[in-house]
Image (cartoon, rainbow, N blue to C red):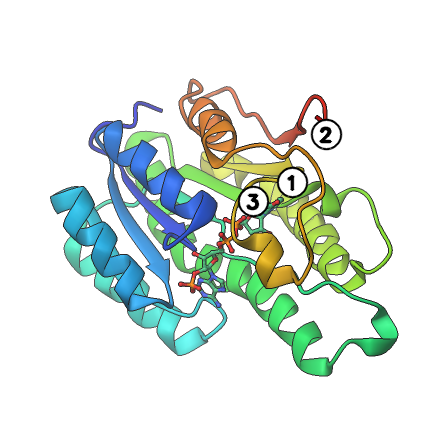
């Protein structure tokens, strides 16, 4: 896909990977609707990135807020080419010490949020396919925690293993509607993720820019070439 002139929705756009994805897509000439809960962070991005960035305050796990956000997007743009399901978090620790609230917020953000946002874009993408022969591209930000289980990561592992299954099923469900579904599996990245998870980052992690370069590559592939999965790791995790 040529990114110039296209419209993308990026969830979790206020920080970390989502902020970097937004910067890169705007540099390529795409319009970005960035969803997140922290209005002040989105306002800073609105000021910095100009007319191509539209911050929308939205908790992706809340059905009403997601419906309202996508109504606002469709009133401002007659096309929707890309959805990056990036919003997510981990809360790490021993299972016996985990609160039901910590379990629920990971499920609600990492899985329910992906379901709600994906459901919201499919009708427009299917319409686009009927008109042009190509529907669009959905990219899910999973994790190596969607491939490998580890102690003290059980709830996060459960959400990301779930996202792997969701992505594979959706890919097969919509490929004949001209809609690409790609699932990215990064290892550790230098973002605020680890302070939210309650652990220190212990390895020589990748940068958000590293992951963004692969996102752009996957999005820019020719229409009949689908990169359905990518695993990303630091070469020397111990430096
Ligand atoms: N960092 C890593 O090592 C790593 C590795 C593999 C995969 N990942 C995945 O990468 C994705 C991005 O994480 P990150 O590393 O960029 O972490 P981050 O810096 O903590 O950013 C998380 C983003 O998600 C948003 N978010 C969280 N809950 C939300 C909700 N309910 N509704 C809307 N937005 C919400 C946050 O915005 P607000 O707080 O403003 O809502 C923020 O913009 C996540 O899915 C994570 O699981 C991260």
Residue bearing mark 3:
141
Task: Specify whether tag 1 is near ligand 1 (CB below 8 Å).
Answer: yes
Mark 2 → mark 3, Cα distance in angstroms = 20 Å
Q: For mark 1, what is the residue?
A: 188
Location of residue 206 with respect to 197 vertically, above or below = above
Residue 116 position in % (x across, y down): 48, 64
Q: How many marks?
A: 3
Q: Earlier in the sequence, mark 1 or mark 3?
A: 3
Residue 16 picture location, percent across and down:
45, 47
Label 2: element kind: loop
Mark whose residue sits in front, 1 or 2: 2
The quadrant of the image that shows the C terminus is: top right
Question: Mark 1 to mark 2: distance in Å?
Answer: 9 Å
Asked whether mark 3 lies closer than 8 Å to ligand 1, one says yes
Which one is earlier in the sequence, the residue at label 2 or at label 3? 3
The residue where tag 2 is placed is 237
The foreground one among 238 and 102 is 238
Image location (x, y in percent) of residue 96: 87, 76
């Amino acid at each position: 896909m040529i990114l110039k002139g296209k419209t993308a929705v990026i969830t979790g756009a206020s920080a970390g990977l989502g902020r970097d994805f937004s910067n890169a897509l705007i540099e390529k000439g795409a319009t970005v609707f960035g969803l997140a809960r922290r209005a002040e962070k989105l306002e800073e991005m609105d000021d910095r990135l100009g007319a191509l960035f539209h911050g929308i305050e939205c908790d992706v796990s809340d059905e009403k807020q997601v419906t309202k956000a996508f109504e606002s997007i469709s009133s401002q743009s007659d096309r929707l080419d890309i959805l990056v399901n990036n919003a997510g978090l981990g809360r790490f620790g021993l299972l016996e010490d985990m609160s039901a609230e910590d379990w629920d917020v990971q499920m609600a953000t990492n899985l329910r949020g992906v379901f709600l946002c994906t459901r919201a874009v499919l009708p427009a993408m299917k319409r686009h396919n009927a008109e042009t022969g190509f529907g669009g591209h959905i990219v899910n930000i999973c994790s190596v925690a969607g491939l490998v289980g580890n102690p003290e990561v059980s709830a996060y592992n459960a959400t990301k293993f779930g996202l792997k299954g969701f992505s594979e099923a959706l890919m097969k469900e919509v490929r004949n509607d001209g809609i690409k579904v790609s699932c990215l599996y990064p290892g550790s990245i230098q973002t605020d993720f680890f302070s939210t998870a309650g652990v220190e980052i212990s390895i020589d992690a990748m940068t958000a820019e590293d992951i963004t370069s692969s996102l752009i590559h996957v999005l820019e592939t020719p229409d009949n070439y689908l990169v359905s999965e990518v695993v990303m790791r630091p070469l020397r995790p111990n430096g």
